Structures are given as structure tokens and as C-alpha cells.
Image (tube, rainbow, N blue to C red):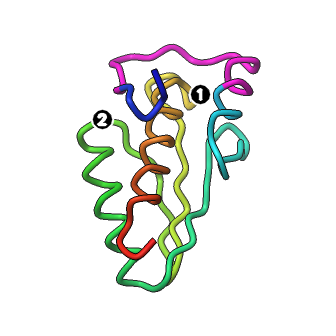
Amino acid sequence: MSLRDMNCTFSPAALDAPDVASLLAELDGWAISGARLERRFALRDYHETIAFVNALAWMTHQQDHHPDLLVTYNSCTVSYCTHSAGGSLTNNDFICAAKADALYAQRAGA
């Protein structure tokens, strides 16, 4: 089952470095920044950026796993870690990253 087809779980376990590396290899454009999983999504303009942010907010609410967002006129940087796992990376971070990628690929006019 692909990451984007999975759902977040309650109280996930922190991943070790080999698991993080393996899951990171399944994602395009994502990187580890400190202890966080992060990607910058380039968008056309403010309207497209906010539409993407709104779609992302809906998805993350459904998964009950919320990222930190940095929103600019034509980009959104998404940053995940799992606070309930002490700020470590968990499967939930990679699941939501894959779902964010799917939203980005489906945006209007892409």
C-alpha cells in the first residue's frame, strides 16, 4: 500500500534513521531539515497558494496531523514532525507528506 493510501494512526512510534531514509526515498522533493520533514511547494500566485493551503488544511484535519506552514505569495513550505512523539518523525509525517504531494499534483491548472 502506498503512503498516500494510508491513514494516520493515534500515538505513532518515532522512526529510526534507516526507516526515515527508506520512507524519504518514497517521496519527491521532500528533505529532512533538522528533525523535520519539509518541502516547499511552488505555486502560480496568491490565489493558487491559498487554494492549496485550504486543501491541505482539510486533508490534515481529516488525518488529525497538522503541519507547520510558511505561506508566501506564490509558495507554501510544509513542515512535519510529530509532537506527540517528542518532535520526532513518524509514519504519520510521511503519510501526510504523500497526501500533500497528491493534492499538489491535482491542483487546478497543473
Q: Residue 88 carries which label?
A: 1
Question: Which residue does the image show at 36% across and 37% down from the upper left?
Answer: 65
Question: Does residue 42 appear left or right of residue 58 in this picture?
Answer: right
Does the segment drawn in magenta span residue 77?
no
Across and down, in percent, residue 13 comes to 51, 14
* Secondary structure found at label 1: loop
- Disc 1 marks a residue whose amino acid type is Ser
Q: Which mark is residue 63?
A: 2
Q: Is the magenta stretch mostly helix, strand or loop?
A: loop
Residue 70, above or below 98:
below
Question: Does residue 98 appear left or right of residue 34 in this picture?
Answer: left
- Disc 2 marks a residue whose amino acid type is Gln
Across and down, in percent, residue 78 comes to 52, 55
Magenta region: which residues? Answer: 7-22
Counting residues from the N terminus, which is met first, the one under dot 2 or under dot 1?
Answer: 2
Question: Which residue does the image show at 62% across and 40% down from the upper left?
Answer: 27
Question: Which residue does the image show at 47% across and 71% down from the upper left?
Answer: 71
